[in-house]
Image (cartoon, rainbow, N blue to C red):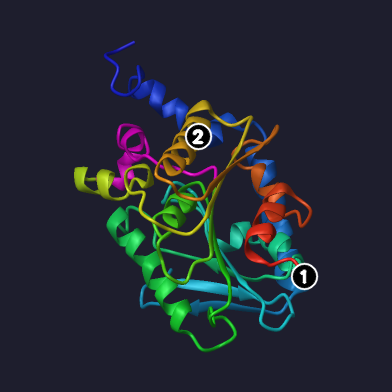
């Protein structure tokens, strides 16, 4: 092994430690099922697709209606290490919140290397600003809002915990520290600057914000589990309302099947914190 560069790992070890696709032997089959299930969701509910919130081609979102008046909003930000996937690929996760009475916003954003981390983070802010001011059914409208992100999307969600329109933040198998990302294969396209590593690592930017759920699959790569535990502990130490939600036997991609399950652990935790119980 060459000289270690992060927590006793060299570049080669870090490349393995953050390669979720390599860690999932059924990756292609899983993604195929996700896309097929996503098309079923699109066909089964009222949906408005590719609503622009900015001028760039990927500054778009889809809005899916649960069919209930004055419903809270569930915003989902997909992952892909800021350089892969589209909102359409993982739309199947909308089934969980839709069946629990949420309207769903599936967010899209420009990927690296076309966009820098600074630009990507800014695009999520632009989306939230648009939704907060939007007077159509897709807008927040003063109703409860849950912002949920998976993997890289979880990092983006965590950075907006202090947004005034957000009721709850949910970070699913998220990245909370960009330092190891900057030292691995992932940085080939991201080209993170030292300022971006500090400014956009949620672990180092814990301000007063919305209550937060941090979930992770207990069969995931150790570094992903460690990052989630570290962030939840850091939030708790700062006096923030945080719940650590370990999902048994789930891996980095299969954890999304729990989020898509109306009776899953994710939706139970979300509904408990967003939708008041009837008296």
User: Residue 39: x, y in percent?
Assistant: 71, 64
Write the start and end of the magenta stretch as one range.
172-192
| Nearer the camera: disc 2 or disc 1 | 1
Q: Number of numbered discs present? A: 2
Q: Secondary structure at mark 2?
A: helix
Q: Residues within 10 Å of mark 2 (few under 14, many from 20)?
A: some
Q: Give 133 or 208, whichever is nearer the viewer.
A: 208
| Residue beneath the point at 51% across and 89% down | 135
Residue 77 badge? none
Q: Mark 2 — residue?
A: 229
Asked whether the viewer can see residue 197, the reply is yes
The part of the image, by quadrant, that contains residue 141 is bottom right
Q: Given the current orientation, which residue lies at the most extreme front position? A: 279
User: Residue 233: x, y in percent?
Assistant: 46, 37
The part of the image, by quadrant, that contains residue 159 is bottom left
Residue 278 badge? 1
The part of the image, by quadrant, that contains residue 47 is bottom right
User: Residue 240: x, y in percent?
Assistant: 45, 49
Q: Secondary structure at mark 1?
A: loop
Q: Residues within 10 Å of mark 1 (few under 14, many from 20)?
A: few
User: Residue 271: x, y in percent?
Assistant: 69, 60
- Mark 2 and mark 1 residues within 8 Å of each other at the beta carbon: no
Q: How far apart in space, not on screen, are marks 2 and 1 (Cα)? A: 33 Å
Left or right? Give the position of 211 relative to 48: left
Q: Given the current orientation, which residue lies at the most extreme top position? A: 1
Q: Is residue 150 magenta?
A: no
Asked whether the viewer can see residue 92, the reply is no
| Residue beneath the point at 47% across and 73% down | 60
Of the two numbered discs 2 and 1 on the same chain, state the one appearing first in sequence: 2
On screen, residue 10 above or below 166? above
Left or right? Give the position of 66 relative to 54: right
């Amino acid at each position: 092994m060459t000289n270690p560069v992060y927590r006793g790992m060299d570049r080669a070890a870090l490349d393995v430690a953050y390669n979720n696709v390599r860690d999932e032997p059924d990756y292609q089959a899983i993604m195929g099922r996700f896309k097929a299930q996503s098309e079923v969701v699109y066909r089964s509910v009222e949906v408005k697709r590719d609503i622009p919130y900015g001028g760039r081609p990927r500054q778009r979102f889809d809005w899916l209606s649960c069919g209930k008046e004055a419903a809270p909003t569930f915003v989902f930000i997909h992952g892909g290490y800021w350089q892969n996937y589209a909102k359409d690929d993982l739309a199947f996760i909308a089934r969980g919140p839709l069946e629990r009475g949420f309207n769903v916003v599936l967010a899209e954003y420009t990927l690296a290397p076309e966009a820098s981390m600074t630009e990507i983070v800014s695009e999520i802010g632009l989306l939230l600003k648009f939704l907060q001011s939007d007077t159509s059914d897709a807008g927040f409208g003063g109703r409860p809002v849950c912002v949920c992100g998976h993997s890289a999307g979880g990092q983006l969600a965590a950075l907006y915990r202090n947004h005034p329109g957000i009721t709850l933040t949910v970070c699913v198998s998220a990245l909370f520290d960009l330092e190891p990302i900057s030292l691995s294969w992932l940085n080939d396209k991201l080209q993170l600057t030292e300022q971006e590593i500090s400014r956009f690592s949620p672990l180092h930017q814990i301000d007063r914000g919305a209550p937060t759920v941090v979930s992770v699959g207990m069969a995931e790569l150790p570094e992903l589990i460690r990052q989630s535990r570290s962030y939840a502990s850091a939030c708790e130490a700062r006096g923030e309302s945080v719940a650590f939600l370990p999902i048994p036997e789930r891996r980095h991609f299969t954890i999304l099947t729990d989020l898509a399950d109306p009776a899953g652990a994710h939706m139970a935790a979300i509904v408990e914190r967003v939708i008041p119980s009837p008296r």
